[in-house]
Image (tube, helix red, strand yellow):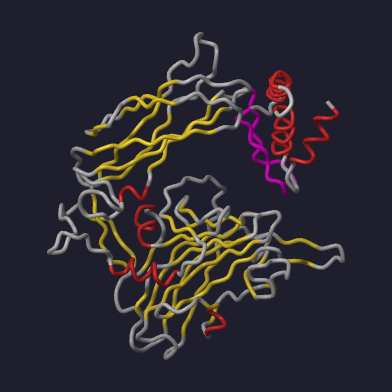
Amino acid sequence: MKDYLIASLKLTPNAPTILEARDALLAAVLANNADDFSIIRDAFAKRGMGALAIAPDRDSVDHSGTIEDFSVGVDLQFNLQLIPSSLDNNTCDNDGVLDAGESASFTVSVKNAAATSIPAFNINLSSGDDVNFASNNIAIESIAEFGETTSTTFELTLNSASDMQNISVTASMPEIGVGVDDFVEPPPVSINLLTHFDFAVSEFDDDISRESTSQYDWQVNFDNNITPFIVTNEAWHGIDSGLPGNSYLLTPIIRVADSGALSINFDHYYLFESSEDNQGEIQNWDAGVIEVSVDGADFVDVVDFGASLSEPYNGTVSSFNDQIGGRQAYTFTRDENDLQLSENAITFADGLVNGQNIQLRFRIATDANTGDFGWLIDNVVVNNAVSPMFSSVVAENNACDVDAGGNVQEDEQTTAATEASGGGSLAFYWLAVMFIFKRFRKD
Protein backbone atom coordinates (compact mmCIF):
# COMPACT_ATOMS: atom_id res chain seq x y z
CA MET A 1 0.00 0.00 0.00
CA LYS A 2 2.87 2.36 0.73
CA ASP A 3 4.18 1.82 -2.79
CA TYR A 4 0.78 2.76 -4.19
CA LEU A 5 0.64 5.93 -2.08
CA ILE A 6 4.11 7.05 -3.13
CA ALA A 7 3.33 6.34 -6.78
CA SER A 8 0.07 8.32 -6.50
CA LEU A 9 1.96 11.42 -5.33
CA LYS A 10 3.68 11.52 -8.71
CA LEU A 11 0.28 11.50 -10.43
CA THR A 12 -1.48 14.02 -8.20
CA PRO A 13 -1.90 17.54 -9.69
CA ASN A 14 -0.79 20.69 -7.94
CA ALA A 15 -3.21 21.81 -5.17
CA PRO A 16 -5.48 18.77 -5.68
CA THR A 17 -9.03 18.30 -4.50
CA ILE A 18 -9.69 15.21 -2.41
CA LEU A 19 -11.19 13.46 -5.45
CA GLU A 20 -8.21 14.31 -7.64
CA ALA A 21 -6.00 12.69 -5.02
CA ARG A 22 -8.36 9.67 -5.00
CA ASP A 23 -8.11 9.35 -8.76
CA ALA A 24 -4.32 9.51 -8.65
CA LEU A 25 -4.22 6.68 -6.13
CA LEU A 26 -6.65 4.56 -8.13
CA ALA A 27 -4.61 5.14 -11.30
CA ALA A 28 -1.43 4.03 -9.56
CA VAL A 29 -3.15 0.90 -8.22
CA LEU A 30 -4.75 -0.02 -11.53
CA ALA A 31 -1.40 0.17 -13.30
CA ASN A 32 -0.18 -2.59 -11.01
CA ASN A 33 -3.04 -4.87 -9.98
CA ALA A 34 -6.70 -4.96 -11.15
CA ASP A 35 -7.87 -6.86 -8.04
CA ASP A 36 -6.34 -4.27 -5.70
CA PHE A 37 -7.98 -1.56 -7.80
CA SER A 38 -11.42 -3.07 -7.21
CA ILE A 39 -10.82 -3.35 -3.46
CA ILE A 40 -9.63 0.26 -3.06
CA ARG A 41 -12.30 1.64 -5.40
CA ASP A 42 -14.98 -0.09 -3.32
CA ALA A 43 -13.41 1.26 -0.13
CA PHE A 44 -13.59 4.83 -1.40
CA ALA A 45 -17.24 4.32 -2.44
CA LYS A 46 -18.12 2.88 0.98
CA ARG A 47 -16.89 6.14 2.55
CA GLY A 48 -18.84 8.48 0.27
CA MET A 49 -16.17 9.02 -2.39
CA GLY A 50 -17.91 7.02 -5.09
CA ALA A 51 -18.10 7.58 -8.82
CA LEU A 52 -20.64 10.43 -8.62
CA ALA A 53 -19.17 12.23 -5.61
CA ILE A 54 -18.43 15.95 -5.96
CA ALA A 55 -15.60 17.57 -4.03
CA PRO A 56 -15.58 21.18 -2.81
CA ASP A 57 -13.54 23.72 -4.74
CA ARG A 58 -9.82 23.44 -4.12
CA ASP A 59 -9.80 26.83 -2.34
CA SER A 60 -12.98 26.28 -0.33
CA VAL A 61 -12.83 27.14 3.38
CA ASP A 62 -16.21 25.65 4.34
CA HIS A 63 -16.44 22.57 2.07
CA SER A 64 -19.66 23.85 0.52
CA GLY A 65 -20.86 21.97 -2.54
CA THR A 66 -19.69 18.58 -1.30
CA ILE A 67 -21.85 15.67 -2.48
CA GLU A 68 -21.26 12.17 -1.18
CA ASP A 69 -21.83 9.13 -3.37
CA PHE A 70 -21.59 5.48 -2.44
CA SER A 71 -21.72 3.88 -5.89
CA VAL A 72 -18.74 2.23 -7.58
CA GLY A 73 -19.87 3.57 -10.93
CA VAL A 74 -20.32 1.92 -14.29
CA ASP A 75 -17.85 -0.24 -16.16
CA LEU A 76 -18.23 1.78 -19.34
CA GLN A 77 -18.63 5.47 -20.02
CA PHE A 78 -20.03 6.74 -23.26
CA ASN A 79 -21.22 9.97 -24.81
CA LEU A 80 -22.98 11.15 -27.91
CA GLN A 81 -21.93 14.29 -29.79
CA LEU A 82 -22.92 16.09 -32.95
CA ILE A 83 -20.09 16.68 -35.44
CA PRO A 84 -20.67 20.40 -36.14
CA SER A 85 -18.66 20.39 -39.36
CA SER A 86 -21.12 17.89 -40.84
CA LEU A 87 -23.67 20.71 -40.94
CA ASP A 88 -21.36 23.06 -42.80
CA ASN A 89 -21.49 20.99 -45.99
CA ASN A 90 -24.89 19.39 -45.94
CA THR A 91 -27.36 19.21 -48.79
CA CYS A 92 -28.90 22.67 -48.88
CA ASP A 93 -28.07 26.00 -47.24
CA ASN A 94 -24.95 24.97 -45.29
CA ASP A 95 -25.83 27.24 -42.38
CA GLY A 96 -24.79 24.89 -39.58
CA VAL A 97 -28.43 23.98 -38.85
CA LEU A 98 -30.04 20.60 -39.50
CA ASP A 99 -33.07 21.31 -41.69
CA ALA A 100 -35.68 18.94 -43.09
CA GLY A 101 -34.15 16.85 -45.87
CA GLU A 102 -30.60 17.34 -44.59
CA SER A 103 -28.23 14.96 -42.83
CA ALA A 104 -25.85 15.25 -39.91
CA SER A 105 -23.10 13.08 -38.46
CA PHE A 106 -22.62 12.11 -34.83
CA THR A 107 -19.86 10.51 -32.80
CA VAL A 108 -20.36 7.84 -30.16
CA SER A 109 -17.39 7.40 -27.82
CA VAL A 110 -17.07 4.51 -25.37
CA LYS A 111 -14.47 4.31 -22.60
CA ASN A 112 -13.48 1.24 -20.61
CA ALA A 113 -13.89 2.04 -16.91
CA ALA A 114 -13.55 -1.55 -15.74
CA ALA A 115 -10.52 -3.41 -14.46
CA THR A 116 -10.98 -6.04 -17.17
CA SER A 117 -11.42 -6.20 -20.94
CA ILE A 118 -14.85 -5.29 -22.34
CA PRO A 119 -16.08 -7.72 -25.03
CA ALA A 120 -17.58 -6.52 -28.32
CA PHE A 121 -21.17 -5.24 -28.19
CA ASN A 122 -23.72 -3.11 -30.05
CA ILE A 123 -25.14 0.34 -29.27
CA ASN A 124 -28.78 0.93 -30.16
CA LEU A 125 -29.93 4.22 -31.70
CA SER A 126 -33.45 5.60 -31.45
CA SER A 127 -35.50 8.77 -31.87
CA GLY A 128 -39.15 9.69 -31.52
CA ASP A 129 -38.85 12.17 -34.39
CA ASP A 130 -39.09 11.71 -38.16
CA VAL A 131 -35.48 10.69 -38.79
CA ASN A 132 -33.64 7.87 -40.52
CA PHE A 133 -30.43 6.23 -39.32
CA ALA A 134 -28.08 4.55 -41.73
CA SER A 135 -28.24 1.75 -39.15
CA ASN A 136 -30.01 1.54 -35.79
CA ASN A 137 -27.22 -0.61 -34.37
CA ILE A 138 -23.57 0.39 -34.06
CA ALA A 139 -21.00 -2.34 -33.57
CA ILE A 140 -18.33 -1.61 -30.95
CA GLU A 141 -15.22 -3.76 -30.91
CA SER A 142 -13.77 -5.11 -27.67
CA ILE A 143 -11.97 -2.57 -25.47
CA ALA A 144 -9.02 -4.22 -23.80
CA GLU A 145 -7.54 -1.75 -21.32
CA PHE A 146 -8.89 0.46 -18.54
CA GLY A 147 -9.10 4.04 -19.79
CA GLU A 148 -9.00 2.98 -23.45
CA THR A 149 -11.56 4.79 -25.62
CA THR A 150 -13.02 3.81 -28.96
CA SER A 151 -15.21 5.99 -31.17
CA THR A 152 -17.41 5.51 -34.20
CA THR A 153 -19.65 7.76 -36.26
CA PHE A 154 -23.13 7.44 -37.69
CA GLU A 155 -25.34 9.54 -39.95
CA LEU A 156 -28.88 10.73 -39.35
CA THR A 157 -31.27 12.24 -41.93
CA LEU A 158 -34.07 14.53 -40.81
CA ASN A 159 -37.02 13.63 -43.02
CA SER A 160 -39.42 16.33 -41.85
CA ALA A 161 -39.71 18.94 -39.11
CA SER A 162 -41.76 21.95 -38.13
CA ASP A 163 -40.08 25.34 -37.74
CA MET A 164 -37.62 25.39 -34.85
CA GLN A 165 -38.44 21.84 -33.78
CA ASN A 166 -36.36 20.15 -31.12
CA ILE A 167 -35.42 16.58 -31.97
CA SER A 168 -33.88 14.00 -29.68
CA VAL A 169 -31.47 11.17 -30.47
CA THR A 170 -30.79 8.45 -27.89
CA ALA A 171 -28.02 5.87 -27.70
CA SER A 172 -28.48 2.93 -25.33
CA MET A 173 -26.31 0.00 -24.35
CA PRO A 174 -27.66 -3.56 -23.89
CA GLU A 175 -26.41 -6.09 -21.37
CA ILE A 176 -22.76 -6.84 -22.09
CA GLY A 177 -21.10 -10.18 -21.49
CA VAL A 178 -22.51 -13.64 -20.90
CA GLY A 179 -24.13 -13.00 -17.52
CA VAL A 180 -26.43 -10.17 -16.44
CA ASP A 181 -24.01 -9.13 -13.70
CA ASP A 182 -20.81 -9.33 -15.74
CA PHE A 183 -20.67 -5.55 -16.20
CA VAL A 184 -22.43 -2.44 -14.96
CA GLU A 185 -23.73 -0.70 -18.07
CA PRO A 186 -24.32 3.05 -18.14
CA PRO A 187 -27.81 4.53 -18.64
CA PRO A 188 -28.84 5.73 -22.11
CA VAL A 189 -27.51 9.07 -23.30
CA SER A 190 -29.45 11.57 -25.42
CA ILE A 191 -28.68 14.66 -27.42
CA ASN A 192 -31.25 17.33 -28.29
CA LEU A 193 -31.03 19.52 -31.38
CA LEU A 194 -32.97 22.59 -32.44
CA THR A 195 -33.68 22.03 -36.12
CA HIS A 196 -35.24 23.61 -39.22
CA PHE A 197 -34.58 27.31 -38.80
CA ASP A 198 -32.48 30.11 -40.27
CA PHE A 199 -30.32 32.88 -38.86
CA ALA A 200 -31.02 36.54 -39.66
CA VAL A 201 -28.41 39.17 -38.80
CA SER A 202 -30.62 41.78 -37.17
CA GLU A 203 -29.29 42.82 -33.77
CA PHE A 204 -26.70 45.19 -32.29
CA ASP A 205 -26.57 43.26 -29.01
CA ASP A 206 -26.19 39.70 -27.77
CA ASP A 207 -27.22 38.67 -24.27
CA ILE A 208 -25.97 35.12 -24.96
CA SER A 209 -29.42 33.80 -24.03
CA ARG A 210 -29.68 31.61 -27.15
CA GLU A 211 -26.70 29.30 -27.53
CA SER A 212 -27.27 28.59 -31.23
CA THR A 213 -27.10 32.23 -32.34
CA SER A 214 -24.09 33.05 -30.18
CA GLN A 215 -22.19 30.06 -31.56
CA TYR A 216 -23.18 31.12 -35.07
CA ASP A 217 -22.05 34.74 -34.67
CA TRP A 218 -18.91 34.43 -32.54
CA GLN A 219 -15.70 32.52 -33.17
CA VAL A 220 -13.71 30.41 -30.75
CA ASN A 221 -10.00 29.74 -31.30
CA PHE A 222 -7.60 28.01 -28.94
CA ASP A 223 -4.15 26.48 -28.77
CA ASN A 224 -3.65 22.74 -28.45
CA ASN A 225 -4.65 21.31 -25.04
CA ILE A 226 -6.28 24.58 -23.98
CA THR A 227 -9.93 24.54 -22.89
CA PRO A 228 -11.97 26.71 -25.27
CA PHE A 229 -14.60 29.33 -24.53
CA ILE A 230 -18.09 27.82 -24.42
CA VAL A 231 -21.63 29.11 -24.02
CA THR A 232 -23.12 27.94 -20.76
CA ASN A 233 -25.83 29.33 -18.51
CA GLU A 234 -26.37 32.24 -20.90
CA ALA A 235 -22.82 33.55 -20.92
CA TRP A 236 -19.51 32.88 -22.65
CA HIS A 237 -17.15 31.15 -20.23
CA GLY A 238 -13.43 30.81 -20.83
CA ILE A 239 -11.57 28.50 -18.45
CA ASP A 240 -8.19 29.39 -16.97
CA SER A 241 -6.77 26.09 -18.19
CA GLY A 242 -3.59 25.75 -16.14
CA LEU A 243 -1.61 24.85 -19.27
CA PRO A 244 0.58 27.13 -21.39
CA GLY A 245 -1.35 28.70 -24.24
CA ASN A 246 -4.19 30.95 -25.35
CA SER A 247 -7.95 30.78 -25.61
CA TYR A 248 -9.72 33.34 -27.82
CA LEU A 249 -13.30 34.56 -28.15
CA LEU A 250 -13.89 36.74 -31.22
CA THR A 251 -16.83 39.01 -31.98
CA PRO A 252 -18.41 39.24 -35.42
CA ILE A 253 -17.01 41.90 -37.75
CA ILE A 254 -18.22 45.37 -36.72
CA ARG A 255 -18.56 48.03 -39.42
CA VAL A 256 -18.07 51.37 -37.65
CA ALA A 257 -20.07 54.46 -38.58
CA ASP A 258 -18.27 57.25 -40.43
CA SER A 259 -18.38 59.58 -37.43
CA GLY A 260 -18.84 59.44 -33.68
CA ALA A 261 -17.31 57.29 -30.96
CA LEU A 262 -17.75 53.51 -31.03
CA SER A 263 -18.51 51.79 -27.74
CA ILE A 264 -18.89 48.11 -26.93
CA ASN A 265 -20.53 47.52 -23.57
CA PHE A 266 -20.44 44.15 -21.83
CA ASP A 267 -20.68 42.52 -18.41
CA HIS A 268 -17.91 40.28 -17.15
CA TYR A 269 -16.45 38.42 -14.21
CA TYR A 270 -12.92 37.06 -14.02
CA LEU A 271 -10.84 34.99 -11.64
CA PHE A 272 -7.35 34.06 -12.82
CA GLU A 273 -4.52 32.23 -11.07
CA SER A 274 -2.52 34.54 -8.82
CA SER A 275 -0.41 33.86 -5.72
CA GLU A 276 2.59 34.98 -3.71
CA ASP A 277 6.01 33.78 -4.84
CA ASN A 278 8.83 32.67 -2.53
CA GLN A 279 9.73 36.32 -1.89
CA GLY A 280 6.20 37.19 -0.81
CA GLU A 281 5.42 39.17 -3.97
CA ILE A 282 2.14 38.73 -5.83
CA GLN A 283 2.55 36.99 -9.18
CA ASN A 284 -0.27 37.16 -11.70
CA TRP A 285 0.37 33.88 -13.48
CA ASP A 286 -2.65 33.88 -15.80
CA ALA A 287 -4.70 36.79 -17.16
CA GLY A 288 -7.15 38.13 -19.72
CA VAL A 289 -6.77 40.95 -22.25
CA ILE A 290 -8.94 42.50 -24.98
CA GLU A 291 -7.46 42.99 -28.43
CA VAL A 292 -8.65 44.54 -31.69
CA SER A 293 -8.03 43.94 -35.39
CA VAL A 294 -8.81 46.74 -37.86
CA ASP A 295 -9.56 45.83 -41.47
CA GLY A 296 -7.95 42.41 -41.04
CA ALA A 297 -4.66 43.66 -39.57
CA ASP A 298 -2.88 41.92 -36.68
CA PHE A 299 -4.55 42.01 -33.29
CA VAL A 300 -3.23 44.54 -30.77
CA ASP A 301 -4.33 45.43 -27.28
CA VAL A 302 -7.27 47.84 -27.33
CA VAL A 303 -5.51 50.12 -24.85
CA ASP A 304 -2.32 50.21 -26.94
CA PHE A 305 -4.47 50.98 -29.98
CA GLY A 306 -5.90 54.03 -28.20
CA ALA A 307 -9.25 52.80 -26.88
CA SER A 308 -10.29 53.19 -23.26
CA LEU A 309 -11.74 50.69 -20.79
CA SER A 310 -14.29 51.90 -18.25
CA GLU A 311 -12.97 49.15 -15.98
CA PRO A 312 -9.21 49.41 -16.53
CA TYR A 313 -6.79 46.52 -16.40
CA ASN A 314 -5.85 45.85 -12.79
CA GLY A 315 -2.41 44.24 -12.84
CA THR A 316 0.78 43.23 -14.62
CA VAL A 317 1.16 39.67 -15.87
CA SER A 318 4.07 37.65 -14.49
CA SER A 319 7.09 37.19 -16.74
CA PHE A 320 6.63 33.43 -16.28
CA ASN A 321 3.63 33.71 -18.59
CA ASP A 322 5.17 33.15 -22.02
CA GLN A 323 2.11 34.47 -23.82
CA ILE A 324 1.59 37.99 -22.45
CA GLY A 325 4.15 38.30 -19.65
CA GLY A 326 4.80 41.93 -18.64
CA ARG A 327 1.55 43.26 -20.12
CA GLN A 328 -1.23 45.04 -18.27
CA ALA A 329 -4.29 42.80 -18.07
CA TYR A 330 -7.24 41.63 -16.02
CA THR A 331 -5.52 39.64 -13.29
CA PHE A 332 -6.68 37.66 -10.25
CA THR A 333 -10.14 39.25 -9.79
CA ARG A 334 -11.76 42.66 -9.55
CA ASP A 335 -12.90 42.11 -5.95
CA GLU A 336 -12.46 38.74 -4.26
CA ASN A 337 -15.42 39.57 -1.98
CA ASP A 338 -17.76 40.42 -4.87
CA LEU A 339 -18.56 37.36 -6.98
CA GLN A 340 -20.82 39.14 -9.45
CA LEU A 341 -20.65 40.40 -13.00
CA SER A 342 -19.49 43.98 -13.40
CA GLU A 343 -20.19 46.45 -16.21
CA ASN A 344 -17.41 47.34 -18.61
CA ALA A 345 -17.14 49.33 -21.84
CA ILE A 346 -14.56 49.66 -24.60
CA THR A 347 -14.65 53.10 -26.23
CA PHE A 348 -12.94 54.09 -29.46
CA ALA A 349 -12.94 57.87 -29.72
CA ASP A 350 -14.33 59.66 -32.77
CA GLY A 351 -11.81 59.40 -35.61
CA LEU A 352 -10.01 56.30 -34.31
CA VAL A 353 -11.79 53.53 -36.25
CA ASN A 354 -14.57 55.30 -38.14
CA GLY A 355 -15.54 53.83 -41.49
CA GLN A 356 -13.51 50.65 -40.86
CA ASN A 357 -14.22 47.01 -40.07
CA ILE A 358 -13.05 45.95 -36.63
CA GLN A 359 -13.13 42.73 -34.67
CA LEU A 360 -12.58 42.33 -30.93
CA ARG A 361 -10.84 39.37 -29.33
CA PHE A 362 -11.15 38.37 -25.67
CA ARG A 363 -7.94 36.49 -24.90
CA ILE A 364 -7.06 34.28 -21.95
CA ALA A 365 -3.32 33.61 -21.68
CA THR A 366 -2.07 30.97 -19.25
CA ASP A 367 1.19 29.54 -17.97
CA ALA A 368 2.20 25.94 -17.32
CA ASN A 369 0.69 25.46 -13.92
CA THR A 370 -2.48 25.70 -11.86
CA GLY A 371 -5.64 27.05 -13.49
CA ASP A 372 -8.66 28.84 -12.07
CA PHE A 373 -12.25 29.82 -12.88
CA GLY A 374 -11.42 32.04 -15.86
CA TRP A 375 -13.57 34.70 -17.54
CA LEU A 376 -17.30 35.25 -18.09
CA ILE A 377 -18.52 37.52 -20.91
CA ASP A 378 -22.20 38.50 -21.14
CA ASN A 379 -24.66 41.14 -22.38
CA VAL A 380 -22.64 42.60 -25.25
CA VAL A 381 -24.00 45.80 -26.83
CA VAL A 382 -22.42 47.63 -29.79
CA ASN A 383 -23.13 51.34 -30.23
CA ASN A 384 -22.51 53.35 -33.43
CA ALA A 385 -22.10 50.54 -35.94
CA VAL A 386 -23.39 50.86 -39.51
CA SER A 387 -25.31 47.58 -39.54
CA PRO A 388 -26.28 44.77 -37.15
CA MET A 389 -23.77 42.00 -36.48
CA PHE A 390 -25.66 39.61 -34.17
CA SER A 391 -28.28 37.12 -35.33
CA SER A 392 -31.76 36.12 -34.36
CA VAL A 393 -33.53 32.84 -35.12
CA VAL A 394 -36.22 32.95 -37.81
CA ALA A 395 -38.33 30.39 -39.64
CA GLU A 396 -36.56 28.26 -42.24
CA ASN A 397 -37.00 29.78 -45.72
CA ASN A 398 -36.38 26.46 -47.50
CA ALA A 399 -33.94 28.18 -49.88
CA CYS A 400 -30.60 26.66 -50.78
CA ASP A 401 -27.65 29.07 -50.88
CA VAL A 402 -26.11 28.42 -54.33
CA ASP A 403 -24.91 30.58 -57.17
CA ALA A 404 -25.71 30.23 -60.85
CA GLY A 405 -23.07 27.53 -61.21
CA GLY A 406 -24.46 25.48 -58.35
CA ASN A 407 -21.71 26.48 -55.91
CA VAL A 408 -22.50 27.21 -52.29
CA GLN A 409 -22.03 30.87 -51.38
CA GLU A 410 -19.92 31.51 -48.30
CA ASP A 411 -21.28 34.11 -45.95
CA GLU A 412 -19.34 37.37 -46.43
CA GLN A 413 -19.25 38.22 -42.74
CA THR A 414 -18.03 34.74 -41.77
CA THR A 415 -15.30 34.91 -44.44
CA ALA A 416 -14.09 38.29 -43.21
CA ALA A 417 -14.17 37.16 -39.61
CA THR A 418 -12.17 34.03 -40.39
CA GLU A 419 -9.52 36.02 -42.23
CA ALA A 420 -9.28 38.61 -39.47
CA SER A 421 -8.95 36.01 -36.72
CA GLY A 422 -5.52 34.92 -37.94
CA GLY A 423 -4.21 31.41 -38.39
CA GLY A 424 -1.03 29.96 -37.01
CA SER A 425 -1.30 26.75 -35.03
CA LEU A 426 -4.74 27.54 -33.71
CA ALA A 427 -7.70 25.24 -34.17
CA PHE A 428 -11.02 26.74 -35.31
CA TYR A 429 -14.22 25.18 -34.08
CA TRP A 430 -17.89 25.84 -33.69
CA LEU A 431 -18.65 24.31 -30.32
CA ALA A 432 -21.62 22.43 -28.98
CA VAL A 433 -20.33 21.50 -25.55
CA MET A 434 -21.96 21.55 -22.16
CA PHE A 435 -20.02 22.65 -19.12
CA ILE A 436 -21.52 23.10 -15.66
CA PHE A 437 -20.27 25.75 -13.26
CA LYS A 438 -21.49 28.07 -10.57
CA ARG A 439 -23.28 31.01 -12.19
CA PHE A 440 -22.21 34.51 -11.17
CA ARG A 441 -24.75 37.24 -11.90
CA LYS A 442 -24.95 40.88 -10.98
CA ASP A 443 -28.00 42.20 -9.21
Main SS of the magenta segment?
loop
Whole-percent x and y of residue 286? 66, 63
- Direction bottom: furthest residue: 351
Q: Nearer the viewer, residue 355 or 12?
A: 12
Magenta-drawn segment: 51-70
Check the image and report above or below for 435 versus 258. Answer: above
Q: Nearer the viewer, residue 66 or 111?
A: 111
- Residue 244 left/right relative to 346: right
Is 301 in the magenta?
Answer: no
Residue 65, quarter of the rendered image: top right
Residue at image position (44%, 26%) is 140
Whole-percent x and y of residue 104? 30, 43
Of the 4 image quadrants, the one containing the N terminus is: top right
Residue at image position (65%, 27%) is 50
Task: For residue 330, say whether it is visible.
Answer: yes
Check the image and report above or below for 121 versus 366. Answer: above
Residue at image position (47%, 50%) is 233
Residue 327, quarter of the rendered image: bottom right
Whole-percent x and y of residue 57? 68, 45
Task: For residue 443, say whether it is visible.
Answer: no
Whole-percent x and y of residue 303? 56, 81
